[in-house]
Image (cartoon, helix red, strand yellow):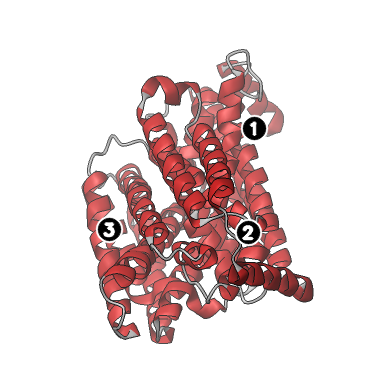
Amino acid sequence: MSANMYQLLAIIIYMLAMLAVGWYAFVRTSNLTDYMLGGRSLGPTVTALSAGAADMSGWLLMGLPGAIYLSGLVEAWIAIGLTMGAYLNWLLVAPRLRVYTQVANDAITIPSYLDNRLRDNTKLIRIASGIIILVFFTFYVSSGMVAGGKFFDSSFGYDYHTGLLLVSSVVVAYTLFGGFLAVSYTDFLQGLTMFIALIAVPIFGLFLTGGLGETIDSIKAVNPEHLSLLPATATATAIISSVAWGLGYFGQPHIIVRFMAISSVKETKQARRIGIGWMMLSLFGALATALVGVAYYQQQGSVLKDPETVFIVLGQILFHPFIAGVMLAAILAAIMSTISSQLIVTSSALVEDIYKALFNKTADDKHYVFAGRMAVLVVSIIAAILAWNPDSNILSLVGFAWAGFGAAFGPIILLSLYWRKLTNYGALSGMVTGAVTAFVWGKVEMLSSALYEIVPGFIVCLLVAIVVSVVTYKPNREIEEEFNRTEQLLKEER
């Protein structure tokens, strides 16, 4: 059997396993809450690893190693910022959001939580939130499909579009039928696969490059500043832009929805420890993989055609073809876990926050579950059209969507959880201005090259939300009671 056949066999086994999990979840899904939020029944380990896998995507195994390979450890500031942001997200948002979404009329999506929390009778918050989620997640899903196409192109020499369609078809199938449970369970398995692969490749790679000392010498031979966090070429704004990625966590619907689904507040602490441990080791593995790749190609006197494929190439060089196929499955795991998480959140926004709120309030759950599945299909088709260009850059697509969510939702989520006086008009104004600022800033080359768009977007959203809330605030007994009840339940559960 050829090397390609061994690798394809591993990929086929992996994809069949994901479809089997999707079928299992389909059998367990009986109503809209099950489909959108898994019945709030996730344990800490599944919550932590599914949140991590949903977060990292193909960026962890392709985008980040590619950036480190090209520019050195100066790109690690993104990883540092993300780790800080993820920790604060678990600490500040997870426990309060778990309680508050249940207190606020058992909200199952972020837009419905904001609508219920702020008593927005106009429904404008739900509609605006749904539109923002739809726009930015379509770009985000598209980035995952680009990664899938590149994966099959670089791994097996398949046509980019064939790979894109294959990955998209499998992930859409298990998401469409299994809903949130399928997404969470597959993300858990995918998180484990990613973790093992990211630890194995750099460890075995060091043997290939002659050990730690030889590897470091080879990297320095390429560029003496490649191992420096602060090379001479680094600027303060570039480092701020990289660290600012951490701000995005507070507003990522596909990540914070996991906090709403965990079975109890008590388990958020254990989930935080598992999640941050997984993240730190995985990020370190991604950085190390890139550096080992730099050393290997320096020693070989050759050039890697596409730096974003360094993990793929090393896996194929280091391991038996079947094990290399498992390593390749880790990339598929990263890609597919994020696509599926984003699709289910986009589906919930379209159905729960736009369609259900505006057009059809009386149908039964079966109708809405069907509508959710159709929403998954439509968004997938649009994202595939956007991803059809094989020259699309994964990191730039992810960065644009990440900034949009962080700027639109991050400050609003934090204020809604910790500030009683946030009003519906303040939240709506902040959300829209934050999203527009990030969108426009990101599309103007002169601005985006100077400072990552999440920074001005986040600041504008926060300031506008506070100012408008102060001007429009009126005491509301129901809001006060819910806020106090949330505080009380948090004390009791802790």
Instruction: Tell me the crowding category of disc 1: few under 14, some 14 to 19, or many 20 or more residues within 10 angstroms, Cα based.
Output: some
Three-letter code for the amino acid on which mark 2 is drawn = Leu
The x and y percentages for residue 424 are 49, 56
The x and y percentages for residue 59 are 47, 44
**Quadrant where the C terminus lies?**
bottom right
| Label 3 sits on residue | 379
| Label 1 sits on residue | 210
As drawn, 215 above or below 53 = above
- Answer whether residue 312 is visible to the viewer in this image: no
Residue at 60% in and 23% down: 219
Three-letter code for the amino acid on which mark 3 is drawn = Val
As drawn, 101 above or below 418 = below
How far is mark 2 from mark 3, CA to CA? 30 Å
How far is mark 1 from mark 3, CA to CA? 48 Å
On the rendered structure, is 158 left or right of 147? left
Label 3 element class: helix
Q: Nearer the viewer, mark 2 or mark 1?
A: 2
| Label 2 sits on residue | 417
121 vs 444, nearest the viewer: 121
Nearer the N terminus, badge 2 or badge 1?
A: 1
411 vs 423, nearest the viewer: 423
Three-letter code for the amino acid on which mark 1 is drawn = Gly
Callouts 2 and 3 close, C-beta under 8 Å: no
**Quadrant where the N terminus lies?**
bottom left
Callouts 1 and 3 close, C-beta under 8 Å: no
Label 2 element class: helix
How far is mark 2 from mark 1, CA to CA? 52 Å
Label 1 element class: loop
- Answer whether residue 80 is visible to the viewer in this image: yes
Nearer the N terminus, badge 1 or badge 3?
A: 1
147 vs 201, nearest the viewer: 147
